[in-house]
Image: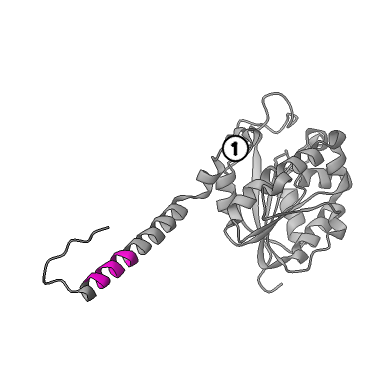
Amino acid sequence: MRLLTGPSVSIRSIVLLLATIGLASALLGIHAVEGHAGSNDLETRLASESRPETDRARDPGRKPAAVVEFLGIGPGMTVMDLIAAGGYYTEVLSLAVGPKGRVIAQNPAFVLEFRDGANDKALTARLADDRLPNVERLDREIEDLGIAPASLDAVVTALNFHDVYNGRGPEAAQKMLETIHRLLKPGGVLGLIDHAGNPDNPDNEKLHRIDEKLAIETARKAGFVVEATSDVLRHPEDDHTRFVFAEGMRGATDRFVLKLRKPPRS
């Protein structure tokens, strides 16, 4: 390459010019990368075709980006997906915490065995070939998780608290939340999402629903403070009398979202 210069331009000036150009290019390159990363918000990542099509089809009814934002979950956090089932929220959380974060996808045996192992197969496929390198699978009972106390920034449990409360009883549900309380760091958050049921409705168990007040009462007994509730998944047209798996109800049930905080000094 030939560099054209005037007679008054010294070799030293040329060297300085080249160095300046190189430095500017390097800086421009860095800023371009930073700008791209900044614009790559969670909604953009959730829309990626790298996610399973079935997950993306469920997003309008589940509003995962809004839920994650409400709970305050972000990059670098250590988060547990409690009773993860096939891992829909596991992958959402994986994208939310990013490469420097960590997600634990926990399932007890009965969830993995449900429907001839459908959840086990789905989670295995989701994590195959290290698709989500920041996710660790934990197939252990809630009573014996093997996780150090005060080591989690957040826990999310979606659409399953009613099964524990209705199926195993209020004491078992409270014990589960007490376990999570111990595992959370002081100030940590439990996000509890579930299908709303009518108060004192004896049919809530078979409808797979629970009265929100019962969930709040149980959480408080376990040591949590109810910091906020969200209406993002509310469906006022749902009168809480239909089976949540009935035709037309998927993604259309009235759901409460609780942001439960472990007090900073507990």
State the extent of the magenta-drawn residues as a range: 14-23
Q: Amino acid at mark 1?
A: Asp
Residue 49 x/y as whole percent: 57, 37
The image quadrant that residue 142 belongs to is bottom right
| Magenta stretch, main secondary structure class | helix
- The answer to whether residue 98 is magenta is no
Q: Is residue 210 visible?
A: no
Which residue reaches farthest top? 247
On the image, the x and y values in percent for residue 218 come to 77, 55
**Image position of 57 with respect to 262: above or below:** above
Task: Tell me the residue that label 1 is attached to.
Answer: 59
Question: Taking 205 as reference, is 134 above or below it?
Answer: below
Q: Quadrant of residue 124?
A: top right
| Nearest to the observer: residue 151 or residue 121 | 121
**Residue at 28% in and 67% down:** 18
Q: Give the vertical position of 240 relative to 103 (above or below).
A: above
Q: Quadrant of the C terminus?
A: bottom right
Tell me if mark 1 has few (under 14), some (14-19) or many (20+) residues whose alpha carbon lies within 10 angstroms of its own: some
Q: Visible in this render: residue 118?
A: yes
Q: Position of residue 165 (x, y in %)?
A: 82, 47
Residue 19 among those drawn in magenta: yes
Query: Where in the figure is residue 232, as x and y percent of width and height?
Result: 57, 43
Nearest to the observer: residue 262 or residue 153: 153
Residue depicted at 66% across the width and 34% down the height: 253
Residue 202 picture quarter: top right
Q: Which residue shows up at 69% across the image and 65% down it?
A: 262
Q: Secondary structure at mark 1?
A: helix
